[in-house]
Amino acid sequence: MALMEIDKKNYGKAIDLLNPLADFGNLVAQLNLALAYELHIPGNEWAAAKWYFKAAKQGSSHAQNKLGLIYAYGHGVPKNSSEAIKWFEKAIKQNSADAMFNLGHLYQQQLNDKNDHTAIIEWYMRAADAGHPMATHHLAKLYANGNGVEVNQSLALELFHTSAELGVANSYYEIGEHYNIGTGVRKNRTTAAKWFQKGASLGSADAQVALGNLYWHGEGVEKDRIQATEWFKRAADLGHKDGRQKLAMAYNDSGVIPQDPANTGILSQRTTKKRNSKTRGIQW
């Protein structure tokens, strides 16, 4: 019954049903109770952390990985990288690819002049070998940019293709960008547009902006500024900074008044900044 309530997004009812079982020590109930507290509006991060901790102590690798994330970002508990690493390592002992990726990502966020990419690459590689989509994508970016490894565009593209097949929307964008610029492959804007289209349809804001740019300038596709504006809008709706700027540019250039009231602020914000630039000395 509790799982049915979660499926129906009735998280409050699910919490009421799961609490007695979780208190009794039922591992599945504890995991689902933690999830229900996470998803409930308003959420209760402290309660979610409490039940993930109880499930982690029972040996759940999923809970151990979640607890690592909780400590890494300070959700419901004080932020503590050492605790995060400890719980990720416990989950990794049970071959959790998610924990491998999250540990590598934590190390990447902590990257500074005093450490290097060694641990990052190691954990991304292990997670990628286990078939983790985002680890494969992140590893590809390291090879594409030469971060901690020699630049290897062929390997980067191979990895981007793998992560794209695993459903990473931004991997389609990265492949498209290789064709758009001509990095590691012959420059081909038509092929770039096809990859951007796939990524954009899957929700990649980067791909949406890139596809909009091609439509705006008529590169690789027939020039279509209505289509371009639509893709800029989709990216803007996702909070993409360049998407918002491109959408404002498109509205101003075409003189179109946004049909969606939520987007009128984008246009007015830009015109306000332009109007005030002389008095404030700020260039748009």
Image (tube, rainbow, N blue to C red):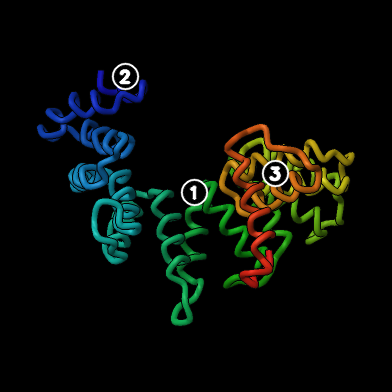
In the depicted structure, whether residue 196 falls above or below residue 80: above
The mark that comes first in sequence, 3 or 2, is: 2
Residue nearest the viewer, comparing 70 with 260: 260
Tally of marks? 3
Counting from the top left corner in percent of width and height, residue 278 is at: 68, 68
Mark 3 vs mark 2, CA separation in Å: 38 Å
Hey, what amino acid is under mark 3? Phe
Is 188 placed left or right of 274 in the picture? right
Work out whether residue 169 can be spotted. Answer: no
- Regarding mark 3 in the picture, which secondary structure is present there? helix
Q: In the rendered image, which residue does mark 1 sit on?
A: 130
Residue 279 or 189: which is nearer the viewer? 279
In percent of the image, x 24 and y 34: which residue is there?
33
Q: Looking at the picture, does residue 37 appear above or below residue 161?
A: above
Q: Nearer the viewer, mark 3 or mark 2?
A: 3
How far is the residue under mark 2 from the one under mark 1? 32 Å
Q: Mark 3 points at which residue?
A: 232
